[in-house]
Amino acid sequence: MLKLHPEILVKNGQKQFAVLPYEEFVAIQERLADADDLLELRKAKRAEGKKRSIPLAAVKRELGLK
């Protein structure tokens, strides 16, 4: 779990903004990007359905890669 250390800014007695250390902001951005990638992968897999796939090892052999 990501530990956050926000500083809450208040205006007229109402919470208005949360300020985070830059490192925590970057960590949140990275996790959101990872989550978005996962959603896109799942969407692509659903779109492919039961289509036949080729294992990575077979593709590497076919291309002459190690």
Image (cartoon, helix red, strand yellow):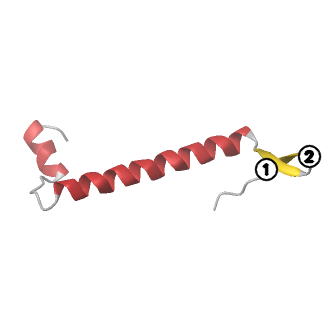
Front one among 32 and 62:
32
Above or below residue 7? Residue 22 is above
Q: Earlier in the sequence, mark 2 or mark 1?
A: 1
Give the x, y percent position of residue 48.
Answer: 17, 54
Per the rendering, the mark at residue 66 is: none
Left or right for 48, reference 39 = left
Give the x, y percent position of residue 59.
Answer: 13, 45
User: At 44% across and 49% down in the image, what residue appears?
Assistant: 36
Residue picked out by circle 1: 6
Give the x, y percent position of residue 40.
Answer: 35, 49
Q: Judge the density around disc 1: few (<14), some (14-19), many (≥20) Cα neighbours within 10 Å.
A: few
Q: Amino acid at mark 1?
A: Pro
Residue picked out by circle 2: 12
Looking at the figure, which quarter contains the N terminus?
bottom right
Give the x, y percent position of residue 6.
Answer: 79, 50
Looking at the figure, which quarter contains the C terminus?
top left
Element type where label 1 sits in the image: loop
User: At 15% across and 54% down in the image, what residue appears?
Assistant: 55
Front one among 15 and 43:
15
Instruction: Single out the residue that lies furthest toward the front.
Output: 12
